[in-house]
Image: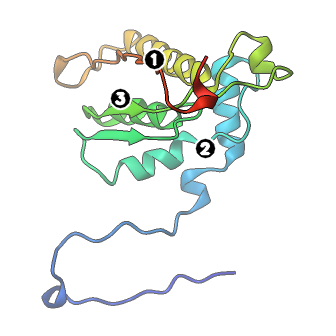
């Protein structure tokens, strides 16, 4: 069992009133990959991605920034970060935007994802974003509790890699 060490600091000794982000995260707050798997399975109706991070973990990390930041995930995978950003914006009325980068890494041909028509991991991520947006819009349509009476922009654009110098990504 680990015990957190507490370091006492006095206000007069601080250079800034802002404290740093704790790297000690409680699994009760951020969940396990089983929660991430459950999220993806609920959205898709099947298990298409192995060991996705839970969106609650990314929400804790994204909350360390502002409510109008641009969040970049260079290894987007199943787009958990986009899911977290969309959920956080709904919760707190934020205007965070996201950029998800995922090379068109092929899904294994014997995988459930491939059999369902998702040829690449990027295809899974795009569909997850679509489904999260649809779910949030449906929840919002049932309620008229829009922050500041302004509907959140939940659209997204997809840019695709055209030609690459990396031989494995050339078609």
Mark 2 and mark 1: Cα distance apart in space: 29 Å
Looking at this view, is 12 or 117 the one in front?
A: 117
Number of numbered callouts drawn: 3
Foreground of the two, 138 or 40:
40
Q: Element type at marker 2? A: loop
What percent of the width, then of the height, locates residue 169?
59, 26
The residue at which mark 1 appears reads as: 162
Which part of the image, by quadrant, shows the N terminus?
A: bottom right
- Tell whether label 3 touches label 2 (CB within 8 Å): no
Image x and y of residue 168, in percent: 63, 30
Estimate the x, y position of residue 18 in percent, counting from the top left. Answer: 22, 69
Q: Secondary structure at mark 3?
A: helix
**Which residue is disc 2 drawn over?**
53
Give the foreground label among 1 and 3. Answer: 1
User: Residue 12's quadrant in the figure?
Assistant: bottom left
Residue at x 54%, y 30% (from the top left corner): 103
Q: Is residue 24 left or right of residue 34?
A: left
User: Which label sits on residue 90?
Assistant: 3
Categorize mark 1 by other alpha carbons within 10 Å: few (<14), some (14-19), many (20+): few
Secondary structure under the numbered disc 1 in the rendered image: loop
Q: CA distance from mark 2 to mark 3?
A: 20 Å
* Residue at the (23%, 25%) spot, across then down: 147
* 60 lies left or right of 14: right
Q: Residue at point 27% right, 20% down?
A: 152
Is disc 2 surrounded by few (<14), some (14 to 19) or many (20+) residues within 10 Å?
many
Residue 149, picture quadrant: top left
Q: Nearer the viewer, residue 68 or 165?
A: 165
Q: Quadrant of the C terminus?
A: top right
Do the residues bearing badges 2 and 1 touch, measured as CB atoms within 8 Å? no
Instruction: Indicate which label's residue lies in the foreground, 2 or 3.
Output: 2
Q: Is residue 44 left or right of residue 159?
A: right
């Amino acid at each position: 069992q680990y015990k957190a060490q507490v370091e006492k600091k006095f206000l007069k000794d601080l250079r800034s009133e802002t404290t740093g982000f704790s790297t000690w995260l409680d699994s009760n707050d951020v969940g396990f990959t089983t929660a991430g798997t459950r999220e993806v399975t609920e959205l898709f109706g099947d298990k298409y991605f192995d060991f996705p991070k839970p969106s609650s973990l990314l929400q804790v990390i994204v909350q360390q920034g502002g409510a109008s930041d641009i969040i970049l995930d260079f290894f987007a995978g199943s787009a958990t970060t986009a899911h977290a950003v969309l959920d956080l914006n709904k919760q707190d009325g934020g205007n965070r935007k996201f950029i998800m980068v995922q090379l068109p890494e092929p899904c294994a041909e014997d995988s459930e994802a491939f059999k369902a028509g998702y040829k690449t991991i990027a295809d899974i991520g795009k569909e997850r974003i679509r489904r999260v947006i649809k779910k949030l819009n449906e929840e919002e349509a049932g309620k008229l509790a829009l922050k500041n009476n302004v509907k959140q922009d939940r659209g997204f654009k997809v840019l695709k890699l055209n030609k690459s110098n990396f031989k494995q990504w050339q078609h």
